[in-house]
Image (spheres, rainbow, N blue to C red):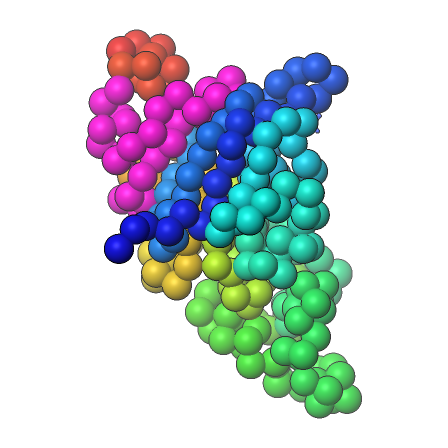
């Protein structure tokens, strides 16, 4: 059976005032795989995610999803197709409760049907949540904090909430931009365990700066440097690559 390519870029380039943050990247993601993208700060990883998720269009090149050209489809249209992301800096609404964040995410993604009419009629403080989001909240271990004001969560719990928001959108492809950034060692272990637990449900792409954190999480690693993909393959193979070692540690 041929492996299906779920997400692909062909020669994507993104220039900011002439500066190429991403340059001619050809990338293929196979359905069901867990893939990592590593690279030094400023390598273009987040910009590449922005191109995959439709935050802005590429200056040149094409983005394909299940073989269809989605280059001009904006972010919300891609979320509708199952391409869902989290951000390097946690992106949740502090002034809302945990459950309000979840309901808002469903509504913003056009999944109002997932939010029952009963929910809107209920006392805002009652415990019931739409099924999808209640499940996602349980998965990340925040069920008992559903009614907390998000501002009162630790940064690690906010990260888990952000992942719950992504999960309740039923992703086909989940893209996590440095999910361990800013977390304590204990929180890193918890979020790692969480990602291990859920990754079989979708295709996963994870950006990470520190290689050691994701070698066991992904089956394929791509290395970005100065906007280009300079290496790709199984993690052990990539880490042994002299060019990668040069870029990362300044020595082969
Ligand atoms: N909106 C923007 N405008 C101008 N330059 C940008 C913008 N976004 C990113 N860059 C630049 O593109 C390069 C790559 O940034 P980024 O994709 O955030 O790298 P990474 O995520 O690998 O650290 C950096 O030099 C950054 O300053
Ligand atoms: Mg980044």
Query: Which of the 4 image quadrants contains residue 57?
Result: top right
Q: Residue 195 appears at what percent x and percent y?
A: 39, 55
Query: Which residue is rendered at x = 47% and y = 30% of the image?
Result: 26
Query: Which of the 4 image quadrants contains residue 215?
Result: top left
Please name whichever residue, 160 or 177, is drawn nearer the observer in this view of the structure: 177
Q: Which quarter of the image is occupied by the N terminus?
A: bottom left
Q: Quarter for ligand 1?
A: top right
Residue 218 in the magenta stretch? The answer is yes
Query: Which residue is rendered at x = 37% and y = 43% of the image?
Result: 35
Whether residue 189 can be seen here? no
Q: How many marks?
A: 0
Q: Residue 172 appears at what percent x and percent y?
A: 48, 59
Q: Residue 241 appears at what percent x and percent y?
A: 26, 20
- The magenta stretch is 216-241
Image vertical order of residue 178 relative to residue 147, above or below: above
Q: Is residue 50 left or right of 177 when viewed as pictured?
A: right
Query: Which residue is rendered at x = 70% and y = 47% of the image?
Result: 74
Q: Residue 27 appears at what percent x and percent y?
A: 45, 34
Please name whichever residue, 212 or 114, is drawn nearer the observer in this view of the structure: 114
Query: Which residue is rendered at x = 51% and y = 32% of the image?
Result: 10
Image vertical order of residue 126 relative to residue 72, above or below: below
Whether residue 105 can be seen here? yes
Q: Which quarter of the image is occupied by the C terminus?
A: top left
Residue 232 in the magenta stretch? The answer is yes
């Amino acid at each position: 059976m041929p492996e299906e390519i779920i997400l692909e870029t062909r020669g994507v380039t993104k220039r900011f005032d002439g500066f190429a943050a991403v340059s001619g990247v050809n990338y293929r993601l196979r359905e069901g795989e867990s893939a990592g993208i590593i690279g030094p700060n400023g390598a273009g990883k987040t910009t590449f995610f922005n191109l995959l998720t439709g935050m802005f269009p590429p200056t040149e090149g094409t983005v394909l999803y299940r073989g269809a050209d989605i280059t001009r489809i904006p972010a919300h249209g891609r979320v509708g197709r199952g391409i869902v992301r989290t951000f390097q800096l946690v992106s949740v609404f502090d002034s809302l409760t945990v459950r309000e964040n979840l309901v808002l995410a469903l509504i913003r993604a056009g999944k109002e049907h997932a939010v029952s009419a009963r929910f809107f009629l209920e006392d805002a403080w009652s415990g019931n949540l739409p099924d999808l989001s209640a499940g996602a909240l349980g998965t990340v271990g925040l069920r008992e904090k559903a009614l907390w004001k998000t501002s009162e969560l630790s940064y690690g719990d906010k990260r888990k909430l952000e992942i719950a928001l992504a999960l309740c959108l039923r992703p086909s492809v989940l893209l996590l931009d440095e999910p361990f950034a800013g977390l304590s060692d204990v929180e890193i272990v918890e979020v790692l365990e969480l990602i291990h637990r859920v990754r079989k449900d979708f295709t996963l792409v994870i950006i990470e700066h520190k290689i050691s954190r994701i070698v066991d999480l992904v089956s394929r690693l791509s290395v970005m440097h100065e906007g280009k993909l300079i290496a790709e393959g199984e993690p052990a193979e990539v880490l042994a690559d002299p060019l990668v070692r040069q870029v990362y540690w300044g020595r082969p």
